[in-house]
Image: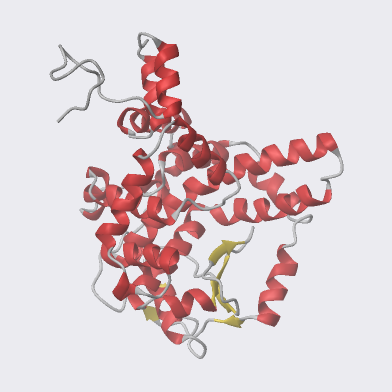
């Protein structure tokens, strides 16, 4: 497939990168994200329902707002971003190039929204923060959202969040909408991990992808930061503390639509070292022509296996407790107490050397 610019001329990536003709979004989607999308695509009448729902959503209003109060990216405006957009669509073989806008906002941010035709919006804070290769990964990230169909659900999430505020005075209505928003946020956090992978596919520069995430956390002070140290933070975050810290992590995450930047960087690096990524780069990946035959049960099985493996390999204290419960740990009450208070440690084996009467040890 060749992407075509607005004047009808064929466009190819500005530098040599592997392209993925006909690639399905299933090639890069996080297992939890993929299982949800495969199930939704299989629902009879799904498209019809959401097209009917589009009459309630502020999509047309959003389009007009960006058209009137932002700068549309083109050959004449932000041409370097225009080239990156065409490159990403070419590499990921997105049939129709979405419109992209730059909006004045000092906060670094980007989004892909829309039901019928997704649009990409970048903030000026983000454009000014990232260098060319880091921005290439971000544009690929947003194109990945468009290819996966995430823009539809992001638009619905924005709409429902607004509804939740309006019905906050209705007890049951607030609970129902709030539960749906919470579930959508959990899915959307996984979709962000998927889109990070798409950004790596588009840019094919792991260090640039990691630097971009690090800058989202620490700002434009690259000379003061280090990618390896940033990744070490993610490992420390996962394993540090006791059960109380595990609960606090969950509470901190619930209101967010995006995973934490350090966690995203660690997840992306892990995927880049996986066999799945290597096979993808070697040209072995699912095609979108096969999407209709994708098995819902297989996708859910992959998702379940992923979460099971996450529990097995996690260094988080709460996940350690889950493993102990699943394994029928002895003295569960004591284990729960020690885990929650941070007094747990490696089991002691054999007699203890040194004084046993409480006197100081050397």
Report the residue at 41% width, 39% height from top: 31
Which of the 4 image quarters holds residue 22?
bottom left
Is 159 above or below relative to 128?
above
Q: Residue furthest right?
A: 169
Q: Nearer the viewer, residue 1 or 112?
A: 112
* Residue 143, image x, y percentages: 46, 63
Tally the marks.
Answer: 0
Is 155 above or below relative to 119?
above
Q: Nearer the viewer, residue 86 or 277?
A: 277
Q: Nearer the viewer, residue 362 or 233?
A: 362
Residue 11 visible in the displayed image? yes
Report the residue at 46% width, 52% height from top: 260
Asked whether, in this view, residue 136 is left or right of residue 176, the answer is: left
* Residue 284, image x, y percentages: 25, 48
Asked whether, in this view, residue 123 is left or right of residue 175, the answer is: left
Position of the C terminus by quadrant = top left
Q: Nearer the viewer, residue 324 or 281?
A: 324
Asked whether, in this view, residue 26 is left or right of residue 177, the answer is: left
Asked whether, in this view, residue 168 is left or right of residue 217, the answer is: right
Q: Residue furthest bottom?
A: 76
* Residue 131, image x, y percentages: 36, 78
Report the residue at 76% width, 47% height from top: 164
């Amino acid at each position: 497939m060749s992407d075509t610019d607005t004047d009808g001329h064929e466009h190819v990536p500005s530098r040599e990168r592997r392209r993925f003709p006909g690639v399905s979004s299933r090639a890069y989607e996080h297992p939890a994200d993929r299982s949800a999308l495969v199930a939704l695509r299989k629902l009879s009448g799904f498209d019809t329902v959401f097209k009917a729902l589009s009459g309630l959503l502020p999509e047309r209003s959003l389009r007009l707002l960006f058209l009137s109060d932002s700068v549309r990216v083109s050959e004449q405006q932000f041409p370097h971003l225009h080239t990156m957009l065409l490159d990403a669509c070419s590499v990921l073989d997105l049939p129709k190039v979405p419109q992209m806008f730059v909006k004045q906002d000092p906060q670094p941010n980007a989004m892909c929204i829309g039901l019928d035709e997704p649009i990409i919006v970048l903030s000026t804070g983000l454009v000014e923060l990232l260098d060319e290769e880091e921005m290439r990964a971000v544009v690929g990230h947003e194109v990945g959202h468009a290819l996966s169909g995430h823009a539809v659900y992001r638009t619905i999430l924005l709409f429902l969040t607004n509804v939740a505020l309006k019905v906050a005075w209705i007890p049951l209505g607030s609970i129902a909408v709030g539960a749906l928003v919470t579930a959508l946020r959990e899915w959307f956090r996984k979709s962000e991990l998927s889109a990070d992978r798409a950004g790596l596919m588009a840019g094919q520069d792991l260090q640039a992808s990691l630097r971009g995430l690090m800058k989202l956390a620490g700002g434009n002070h690259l000379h003061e930061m280090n990618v390896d140290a940033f990744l070490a933070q993610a490992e420390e975050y996962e394993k540090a503390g006791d059960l109380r810290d595990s609960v606090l992590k969950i509470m901190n995450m619930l209101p967010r639509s995006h995973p934490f930047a350090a966690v995203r960087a660690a997840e992306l690096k892990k995927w880049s070292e996986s066999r799945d990524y290597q096979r993808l780069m070697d040209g072995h990946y699912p095609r979108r022509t096969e999407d209709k035959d994708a098995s819902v049960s297989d996708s859910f099985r992959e998702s379940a296996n992923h979460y099971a493996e996450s529990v097995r390999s996690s260094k988080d204290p709460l996940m350690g407790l889950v493993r102990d419960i699943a394994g029928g740990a002895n003295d569960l009450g004591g284990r729960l107490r020690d885990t929650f208070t941070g007094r747990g440690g490696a089991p002691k084996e054999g007699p203890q050397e040194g004084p046993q009467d409480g006197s100081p040890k050397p």
